[in-house]
Image (cartoon, rainbow, N blue to C red):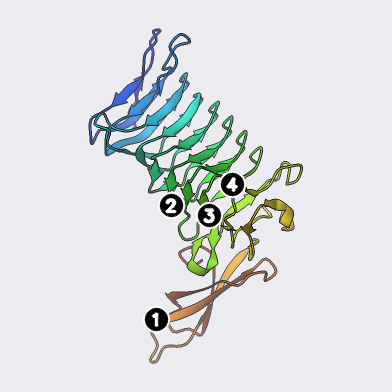
Amino acid sequence: MSSAPIRFTDRGQSWRGLQIEGDGSSLKHIVVERVGHESDPYHPAVEIRAQNVTLKDATITANEWTAIKADETPSSATSSFTLRSSLISGNEWGIDARKTVATIRHTTVKNNDDVGVHFGYGASSPEFVNNTVSENGLEGVQVYGGTIHKFKDNVIKDNGQYGLDIFDSAYVYMDGDSQNKIFNNEYHEVLLDGGSEVYLGNASIDEGGYNEIYDTDEGYGSGKRYVKNRTSWTIPAEMNDWGGPNDDPVSSGMFDGPVDYEPFVTPPLTAFLSCAPADGGGTVSCYAGATGGGGNYSYDWNKDSCDGSSTCSVPCGGGVC
């Protein structure tokens, strides 16, 4: 039987939240709520100013300002933290990462009044993986001058402005088959501006791809685009699904600015591995070509598979495509 969480709350009086300044601190199975007061609201519920901090199974909710703020340590060093398996909901801001290294996995950030997740100047994220960011008042994920090195398996949906907003020399990289779902956000699903870069999919180096980016509520047009690029740099956006569950036809009108969105994929998707039988049998190195969506793309890479068979066919996933 699971125990009740440790609850940090106001008990009828205004309080200023938790400030973590001890390196290696770990907080698990906690609830932090009701930080701030109308006369003194600007205190984060959890402020991280230390290195190697861990928050796991945390619920941070109903606070007057930011749920989690991470910035430099008292000695001006870069802080670092890992957030896992947590819920950030019903605050003014969700997560505000500044001069910090933030690893965020398996966390839901929803129903915050302003931005869901903000990576500001000096912030980097080795992993932003398997998170859901939804129904926040403004942007879902906002990267202003920061860097995300691995953006993968996230759901970014139903936010009040942009889904993924990348601005002012910020960088977002996607590793392998990214499989993010970015959809039904109020304005552009992905916005790039201010000398920034995002790698949505580059078939030649197996970087990103297999994202689903679409809008079933409003579609595109009247100023809305699935990808809006205000820079002169061409966004690599190959091997993604733009049609969504309705399998809408892919159109150049879904994009504004230089976006390399072809070849694209449409479900269902199957990878076919063509193998040359090895001498004497055994595992062989395969040349793989993926086909799907009416054969509108071709994608080649090497996989060690097939165990000597001449051909084999497997669904996407499981480390195949």
- Relative to 258, is 200 on the left or the right? left
Which label was assigned to residue 179?
Answer: 3
Indicate the amino acid at tag 4: Ile
Question: What residue is disc 2 on?
Answer: 150
Outermost residue, bottom side: 279
Q: Is residue 33 left or right of residue 140?
A: left
Which residue is at a point 65% across and 61% down the rendered structure image? 266
Q: Position of residue 168 (x, y in %)?
A: 50, 42
**Label placed on residue 283:** 1
The mark found on residue 182 in the picture is 4
Total marks placed: 4
Q: Is residue 220 above or below residue 278?
A: above
Q: Residue at x 43, y 52 (%)?
A: 150
Sequence-wise first label, 3 or 1 = 3
Is mark 4 in CB contact (under 8 Å) with mark 2? no
Closer to the camera: disc 4 or disc 1? Answer: 4
Per the rendering, the mark at residue 148 is none
Question: In 3D space, how far apart are the residues under numbered discs 1 and 2 (Cα atoms)?
Answer: 31 Å
Mark 1 residue crowding within 10 angstroms, few (<14) / some (14–19) / many (20+): some
Sequence-wise first label, 1 or 2: 2
The residue under the point 45% across, 25% down is: 66
Local SS, label 4:
strand
User: Disc 4 to disc 1, how far (Cα)?
Assistant: 38 Å
Residues packed near mark 3 inside 10 Å, few (<14), some (14 to 19) or many (20 plus): many
Disc 2: CA contacts within 10 A as few (<14), some (14-19) or many (>=20): some
Of the residues tagged 1 and 2, which is closer to the observer?
A: 2
